[in-house]
């Protein structure tokens, strides 16, 4: 398909890999964080790591919206369905995230909660129109990509006076999460995540543009290369990061110029700021409370805010003790460092959030990378040589 | 979640709706979030909404950059 297949050419990927190996200085290590779950998925699925020299390491960041959704927020949605009788609609990935009391949205559905998977916020509105006797709540999660469609739904609901529709808003912001990773005291104390640069999100940047990353480049001296989600895009971005590091530069570069401009999608941004305002603080799974990192619904649209409509109050819930999602989301640990990875915790039965979405670091490694962990020993060939 | 796909606009419909074609699959999406799109444009579709437009010239430039690398590799005799 156009704009997809031509960015997946294996021969070209190997050539970019060879160029990275030629340009990366053998006497130093390069650690780059791909913030976005879409990149994590592409790196695992297309075997990008195999094409990189050993001294170029990729760290998976917290850019999977399902993975960073804290248990307490899912509990709110479950309670709306089970205790308040609301029809709760959400995206497919969100359905299986483990919550309190061994529940998830899908298990709460099995207990009789009216919970529905929708493809878009517009579908949730259609459900509200079709069920005027019920409260319909859209459990909205996601980064800057998913936020404009939610804003559009709220604005349209207000325009048509859709009285039984509201949104439980859990939209989060990319730039503040990156700042938090760079400033977080835990990361500084652990000292194990030296990040030499970032691969910037593809689709988030379509909406917000490349300008919001200038701050990291200037303030923290970290290069950022915005890249598309196809494997060649990721490889090219890694090459561009290696070059910046070698030249001692820290700039924002854009590999994804076919869809990302410096200013982004201004129409979507205007709609988002009309409907949403900054939350002073929001809890992220794995990162804790992050200041000014999420959005809430503005006063003018209060009627469509499920938190006000149902008078909800948030209670934080600790993650399962055995789960290392927190450290993995920070880039401090790898999926295989977790004791329950691939045993108790699998994509079929996820314990932690990183195993739920295919974009989560653990699910991506389980699906595409776990056989790499097993060393290949060519015993038969050796035996044949020795025995005759 | 953030996985969105480029698809070609094949029909504009009232109320900011449009039909895209993705490898033979047709789907109605919303174009309320993008400005000035035309039939034939490639849009990035995410959760039922076009969130951006592909710039064909820039896509060509990126592909040309890769082609250049292939040419250099060929000249160097590298794999």
Image (spheres, rainbow, N blue to C red):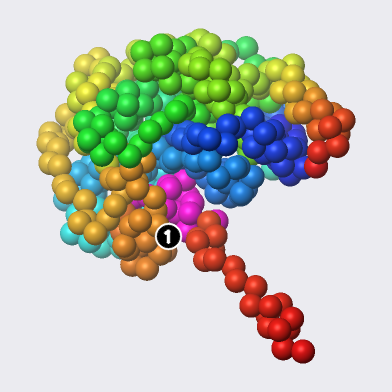
Q: Is residue A385 left or right of residue A84?
A: right
Q: What's the magenta region?
A: A353-368
Residue pictured at 55% horizontal, 56% vertical: A368
Q: Is residue A258 left or right of residue A326?
A: right
- Whether the magenta-drawn stretch holds residue A386 is answered as no
Q: Position of residue A148 (x, y in %)?
A: 43, 23
Quadrant placement of the N terminus of chain A: top right
Q: Residue furthest bottom?
A: A388
Q: Position of residue A360 (x, y in %)?
A: 42, 47
Q: Name the element at disc 1.
A: loop
Near mark 1 (Cα within 10 A), the count class, few <14, some 14-19 or many ≥20, is: many
Q: Position of residue A83 (x, y in %)?
A: 16, 50
Residue pictured at 64% horizontal, 77% vertical: A379
- Residue that numbered label 1 is attached to: A347
Residue pictured at 19% horizontal, 44% vertical: A72
Residue pictured at 26% horizontal, 32% vertical: A188
Residue B19 appears in the figure: no
Q: Main secondary structure of the magenta part?
A: helix
């Amino acid at each position: 398909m156009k704009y997809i297949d031509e960015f997946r050419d294996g021969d070209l990927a190997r050539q970019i890999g060879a160029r990275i190996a030629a340009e990366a200085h053998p006497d130093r290590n390069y650690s780059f964080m791909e913030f976005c779950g879409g990149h994590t998925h592409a790196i695992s699925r297309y075997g990008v790591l195999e094409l990189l020299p050993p001294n170029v390491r990729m760290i998976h960041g917290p850019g999977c919206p399902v993975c960073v959704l804290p248990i307490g927020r899912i509990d709110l949605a479950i309670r709306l369905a089970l205790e308040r009788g609301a029809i709760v609609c959400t995206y497919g990935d969100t359905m299986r995230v483990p919550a309190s009391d061994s529940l998830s949205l899908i298990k709460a559905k099995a207990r009789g909660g009216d919970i529905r998977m929708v493809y878009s916020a517009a579908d949730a509105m259609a459900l509200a129109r079709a069920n005027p006797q019920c409260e319909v709540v859209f459990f909205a999660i996601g980064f800057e990509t998913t936020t404009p469609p939610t804003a559009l739904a709220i604005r349209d609901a207000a325009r048509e006076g859709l009285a039984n529709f509201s949104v439980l808003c859990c939209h989060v912001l990319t730039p503040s999460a990156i700042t938090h990773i760079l400033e977080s005291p835990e990361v500084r104390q652990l000292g194990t995540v030296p990040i030499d640069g970032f691969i910037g999100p593809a689709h988030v940047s379509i909406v917000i543009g490349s300008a919001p990353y200038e701050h990291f480049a200037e303030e923290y001296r970290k290069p950022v290369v915005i890249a598309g989600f196809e494997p060649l895009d990721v490889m090219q971005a890694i090459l561009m990061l290696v070059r910046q590091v070698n030249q001692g530069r820290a700039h924002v570069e854009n590999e994804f110029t076919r869809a990302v401009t410096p200013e982004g999608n201004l129409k979507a941004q205007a709609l988002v700021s009309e409907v949403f305002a900054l939350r002073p603080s929001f809890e992220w799974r794995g990162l804790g409370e992050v200041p000014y990192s999420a959005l809430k619904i503005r006063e003018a649209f209060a009627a469509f805010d499920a938190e006000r409509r149902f008078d909800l109050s948030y209670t934080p819930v600790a993650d399962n003790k055995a789960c290392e999602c927190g450290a993995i989301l920070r880039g401090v640990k790898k999926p295989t460092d977790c004791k329950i990875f691939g045993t108790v915790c699998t994509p079929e039965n996820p314990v932690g959030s990183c195993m739920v979405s295919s974009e989560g670091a653990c699910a991506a490694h389980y699906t595409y990378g776990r056989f790499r962990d097993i060393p290949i020993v060519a015993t038969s060939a050796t035996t044949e040589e020795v025995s005759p | 979640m953030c996985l969105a796909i480029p698809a070609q606009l094949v029909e504009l419909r009232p109320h900011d709706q449009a039909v895209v074609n993705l490898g033979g699959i047709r789907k109605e999406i919303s174009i309320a979030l993008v400005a000035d799109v035309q039939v034939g444009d490639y849009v990035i579709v995410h959760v039922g909404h076009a969130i951006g437009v592909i710039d064909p010239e820039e896509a060509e430039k990126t592909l040309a950059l890769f082609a250049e690398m292939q040419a250099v590799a060929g000249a160097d005799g590298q794999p």
